[in-house]
Every structure is written in structure tokens, then in C-alpha cells.
């Protein structure tokens, strides 16, 4: 390690230690994960979790995911740990899979929106893991305090929604977090740009058949490596495309986003300096386009996901009025990306 790398690593580890201390003290920390940045608070501290909801402007009815450092810690956040959960955790953690199970008593109702289940995951990011380990490590020491022993998961998990203002595009850099939340957060831990770029897959094991509640970083075809039967909430997205108005507006830019299928390329306005076209590569337009901005997205679901939110935020900064987004094919591997495009464009006027 060179001198500069060494100095950088010392600074990082001091920042991570500080982040864990702030969380222990009931504060709020934005931190990097492999998917998007999270806005974290101690999952056993009601006041701290309420502050996360306030900062985001998030409705109290939407539960948040609890982040932990390892399987052992995850087990302390839930009241049952079925075989399927163990297999999934061993196969996909650390990684972009959230598993929903009946909650442990220590998880406060603010985390689960009053519900009996909790979503848990181990994020795949070195800074997040180090922060969670330090946070939980001090919790283990606290266990020796008899008053805390009855509450097994105290300080083990960090409840964190994405670190954006509610219904805005999720942040994939520390700067995005700052742009949305500014100084309202006690600390923003900078771990560079997120590699996955869209949120985790949320899978419920609290239902008779494992159910995908939100498509994300782990594809359904990957889940089939471990599970025999899977239900997908809402089924295929093709029905959603037909009536985007019914879709909750989510992950949306300020500009009006319009999703279109490749066959509908003719609908894209031919001119307009304040219009942006986000197309799949290779670009194949029926006529020359004079859209102010044309972006050719990678024709690969993982690479597409990595850049999508960053592109939406960049276009917002450029004050474009409309963003025309070409939908990738209606195939399983594009499921999560299509979901995010349709949600971004579900704004109705
Ligand atoms: O990748 C991610 O999941 C990121 C990073 C920070 O981990 N987090 C994230 O959190 O996207 P958020 O709060 O923006 O989205 C959490 C999703 C919501 O759709 C929520 O309804 C669902 O997970 N969820 C959380 N707990 C749940 C539960 N107990 N039952 C059902 N759905 C749950
Ligand atoms: Mg979110």
C-alpha cells in the first residue's frame, strides 16, 4: 500500500468508526451499499427510525429494510429462520437480496410499519459491512448489561430505506445523497458509486409460496437455483405498461418521463432542445432525431441498471422537460430494469 492509499484507508476507517458511534447514539447515517445508498438508524430505536422517516418525507405505512453484517445477526432480527432462508442467505449474501420473515420482538414497529414481518439483508459493500460489524460489535458488549439481555437484537441491525427524498430517484453516489438531504443527515459515508445501481430484490418467505415483492439486483432465474416455486407480485410487467397511471409513482425524476417500446420509436418527438432520449444501443431511429440529449444505454441488464438512476439525476440537473425512455424487451432478465423505468414514467398529468 502506498502512502496515499494508507492515509485514505486510515481516514475511511475513522469515518466508519464514527458512523457506527453515531448509529449507536441514535443518530442517522447515510451509507453506501452495492445497490443504492441507504439512510440508516438503529433498528431497535424508535425515535431514531422515526427521524429517518421525517428526513425522507416517507409515509409511516411503508416498512424499511434492516441491514446486518452476517447471517447470525440476521437471525437475531427474525423469529423464525427456515431452511429456505438459510439456503438463500448462503447463496446470495452479502448481496442484493432482502428476505422478509416474521420479526423478532426487538425490531421496533416503526421499522415494519406496525407489521409482524421484517425485511433483512447483508449488503455487499466493504464500508457498509465494516460499519455494521462495528455497530453490532458494540451491541454484543452491551449484552453483558442485564437490562439489555432480554432484547437480543438491540443494536444488531441498521434500518435503512434508500437515502433519497421519498418517491425521488434513489441515490447511487454520496453526492446524490447530499443533493437530496443536505445537512439533515448526521454523516454521509462516501463509498464511491454503487455497482448494482438499483435496489435489492425483496423476497417474502412469510407467505406460503416465496413471493417476489419487488424485482431487483438478484434475478428470479437466480432465485430458482435455490427455490422450487416462486410467485411474483403483480406477475409480468406487461400489464402495467398498458396502464401506467395505476402504478405508484416512484423512483421518479422531476422531468416527465415517458416509456416507449422499441416498435413505438416513431412517437419520439423529432425535435426539442429540452427533450432527452434514453435509448438502447445500438441506436436505431426511424428518422434523424434532434432531441437535445441522446443517451445510448448499455444493452445488458446489469450495466443498464448500474447507470440508470445516475442518468435520470443528470438529466434533471440539465432541466430537460421530457425524458423518452426506450423499454428493453419484456424478458425475465430485464424485469427489474423495466420495473424501474415504468415506475419512473408513471407520473400522470
Ligand atoms: O437495495 C435496497 O434494498 C436499498 C438499500 C439501501 O439496501 N434499500 C431500499 O429501501 O431500497 P427502500 O425503503 O427504499 O425500499 C424497501 C422496500 C419497499 O418496497 C418496502 O415496502 C419493502 O422493501 N419492505 C421492507 N420491509 C418489508 C416487509 N416487512 N414486508 C414487505 N415489504 C417490505
Ligand atoms: Mg426507496
Image: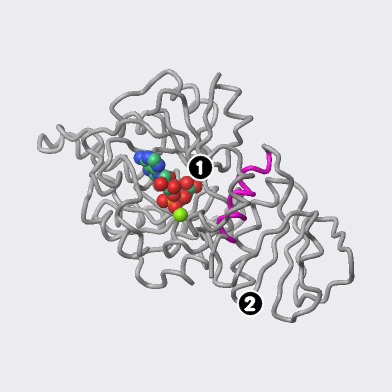
Quadrant assignment, res 188: bottom left
* Residue 336 is one of the magenta-drawn residues: yes
Residue 20 place in picture, x, y as percent: 34, 51
Q: Which mark, by number, is residue 214?
A: 1
Magenta segment's dominant SS is helix
Quadrant assignment, res 165: bottom left
Identify the residue under disc 2: 321
Residue 42 place in picture, x, y as percent: 29, 49
Respond yes or no on whether mark 1 lies under 8 Å from ligand 1.
yes
Is residue 216 in sight in this rendering?
A: yes
Residue extending furthest left? Answer: 147
Q: Nearer the viewer, residue 296 or 327?
A: 327
Residue 235 place in picture, x, y as percent: 56, 37
Please, is residue 320 above or below residue 242 in the view? below
Q: Nearer the viewer, residue 159 or 250?
A: 250
Count of picture labels: 2
Q: CA distance from mark 2 to mark 1?
A: 29 Å
Q: Which mark, by number, is residue 340?
A: none
Residue extending furthest bottom? Answer: 273
Residue extending furthest front? Answer: 243
- Looking at the rendering, the stretch of residues picked out in magenta corresponds to 333-345
Respond yes or no on whether mark 2 lies under 8 Å from ligand 2.
no
Badge 1, how many Cα within 10 Å: few under 14, some, many 20+?
Answer: some
Q: Which residue shows up at 35% across the image and 44% down it? A: 134
Viewed as shown, does residue 275 lie left or right of 177?
right
Helix, strand or loop at disc 2? loop
* Residue 141 is one of the magenta-drawn residues: no
Helix, strand or loop at disc 1? strand
Badge 2 or badge 1: first in the primary sequence: 1
Please, is residue 181 above or below residue 115 in the view? below
Amino acid at each position: 500500500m502506498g502512502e496515499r492509499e494508507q492515509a485514505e484507508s486510515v481516514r475511511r476507517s475513522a469515518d466508519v468508526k464514527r458512523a457506527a458511534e453515531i448509529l449507536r447514539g441514535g443518530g442517522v447515517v447515510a451509507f453506501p451499499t452495492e445497490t443504492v445508498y441507504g439512510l440508516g438508524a438503529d433498528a431497535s430505536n424508535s425515535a431514531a427510525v422515526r427521524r429517518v422517516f421525517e428526513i425522507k418525507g416517507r409515509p409511516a405505512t411503508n416498512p424499511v429494510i434492516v441491514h446486518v453484517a452476517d447471517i447470525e445477526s440476521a437471525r437475531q432480527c427474525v423469529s423464525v429462520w427456515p431452511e429456505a432462508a438459510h439456503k438463500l442467505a448462503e447463496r446470495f449474501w452479502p448481496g442484493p437480496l432482502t428476505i422478509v420473515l416474521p420479526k423478532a420482538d426487538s425490531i421496533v414497529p416503526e421499522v415494519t410499519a406496525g407489521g409482524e414481518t421484517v425485511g433483512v439483508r447483508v449488503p455487499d459493500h466493504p464500508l457498509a459491512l465494516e460499519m455494521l460489524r462495528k455497530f453490532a460489535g458494540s451491541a454484543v458488549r452491551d449484552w453483558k448489561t442485564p437490562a439489555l439481555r432480554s432484547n437480543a437484537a438491540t443494536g444488531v441491525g441498521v434500518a435503512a430505506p434508500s437515502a433519497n427524498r421519498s418517491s425521488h430517484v434513489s441515490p447511487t453516489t454520496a453526492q446524490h445523497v447530499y443533493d437530496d438531504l443536505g445537512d439533515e443527515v448526521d454523516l454521509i459515508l462516501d463509498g464511491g458509486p454503487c455497482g448494482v445501481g438499483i435496489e435489492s430484490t425483496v423476497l417474502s418467505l412469510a407467505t406460503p409460496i416465496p413471493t417476489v415483492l419487488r424485482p431487483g439486483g438478484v434475478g428470479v432465474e437466480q432465485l430458482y437455483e435455490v427455490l422450487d416455486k416462486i410467485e411474483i407480485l403483480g406477475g409480468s410487467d406487461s400489464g402495467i405498461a398498458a396502464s401506467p397511471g395505476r402504478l405508484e409513482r416512484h423512483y421518479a425524476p422531476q422531468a416527465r418521463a415517458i416509456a416507449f417500446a422499441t416498435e413505438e420509436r416513431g412517437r419520439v418527438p423529432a425535435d426539442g432542445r429540452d427533450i432527452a432520449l434514453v435509448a438502447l444501443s445500438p441506436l436505431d431511429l426511424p428518422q434523424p432525431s434532434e432531441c437535445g440529449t441522446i443517451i445510448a444505454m448499455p444493452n445488458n441488464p446489469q450495466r443498464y441498471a448500474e447507470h440508470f438512476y445516475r442518468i435520470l439525476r443528470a438529466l434533471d440537473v440539465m432541466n430537460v422537460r421530457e425524458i423518452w425512455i426506450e423499454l428493453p424487451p419484456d424478458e425475465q432478465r430485464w424485469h427489474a430494469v423495466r420495473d424501474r423505468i415504468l415506475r419512473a414514467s408513471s407520473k400522470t398529468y
